[in-house]
Amino acid sequence: MEHDNSRLIILASGSPRRRELMSNLGLPFEVMVSDADESTPPDFTPEMIVHTLALRKAEAVLPAAGERNAVIVGSDTIVVLDDKVLGKPVDEQDSKAMLSMLQGRTHQVYTGVACIGLPDGKSEVAHRVTSVKMRTLGEEEISAYIATGEPADKAGSYAIQGLGATLVEEIEGCYFNVVGLPLSLLGGMLTRFGISVLNRQG
Ligand SMILES: Cc1cn([C@H]2C[C@H](O)[C@@H](COP(=O)(O)OP(=O)(O)OP(=O)(O)O)O2)c(=O)[nH]c1=O
């Protein structure tokens, strides 16, 4: 595929974490906030959930993106413990319930990434899984962590990139996947859409 680094990247996300991770690539990009419905059927597997939502988020900005020479990137992150899927907490009570379940155990973080090329509309969706082992936490520690405000808008009610780092004993897999945008997966996908992350010449 011919490389076309004049092709614009559009990040379909309101997440400041994803914006920061995307800026690590050093390529120009625009942010368009997608207002996609985040519900999925109850029988969906974690993989189906993150694929569907990543694509839905990318598709949601199609009208705003117009006919530009661009690649839209959408992404979705969930935490999975046994058969339970944990998204963002609805309130502090919910955060407490999530952290009580996650403490002392290993869970999986799934992040789906969808790319839609414009103007042709060609799309690709993929995901990564990272295992995260959380240390044992007492009730007081859980309450103190919730009081910092950090869990509020994070899947599973923790942020590995913040104070949540002190709760994580071990991870297996891509760190950036846990924060919300697996950069090695994205780099490979962008290359297939003609955007070369490493070779800025062409
Ligand atoms: C597990 C974990 C999740 N998260 C965040 C990443 C995502 O922003 C969020 C999961 O919610 P998402 O619904 O994936 O994303 P979002 O609503 O924040 O943003 P948008 O849909 O507009 O792209 O949880 C962390 O920042 N650190 C972590 O350690």
Image (tube, rainbow, N blue to C red):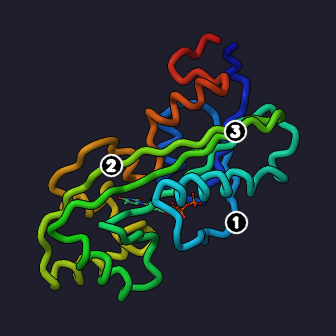
Left or right, 194 with respect to 24, comes to right
Of mark 2 and mark 3, the one earlier in the sequence is 3
What amino acid type should be assigned to the residue bearing mark 2? Thr
Residue 177 position, x and y percent, is 40, 47
Q: Secondary structure at mark 2?
A: strand
How many angstroms separate mark 1 from mark 3 (CA)? Answer: 19 Å
What amino acid type should be assigned to the residue bearing mark 1? Asp
- What residue do we see at 69% from left, 39% from top? 123
- What residue do we see at 64% from left, 46% from top? 11
- Residue behind mark 2: 130
As displayed, is residue 23 above or below residue 57? above
Left or right, 30 with respect to 146, comes to right
Left or right, 134 with respect to 125, comes to left
Q: Secondary structure at mark 1?
A: loop
Q: Secondary structure at mark 3?
A: strand
Q: Residue furthest front?
A: 43
- Residue behind mark 3: 123
Q: Residues within 10 Å of mark 2 (few under 14, many from 20)?
A: some
For the C terminus, the image quarter is top right
- What residue do we see at 42% from left, 75% from top? 152
For the N terminus, the image quarter is top right
Residue 50 position, x and y percent, is 53, 56
Task: Name the mark on residue 35.
Answer: 1
Residue 72 position, x and y percent, is 69, 42
How many angstroms separate mark 2 from mark 1 (CA)? Answer: 27 Å
Q: Nearer the viewer, residue 70 or 144?
A: 70
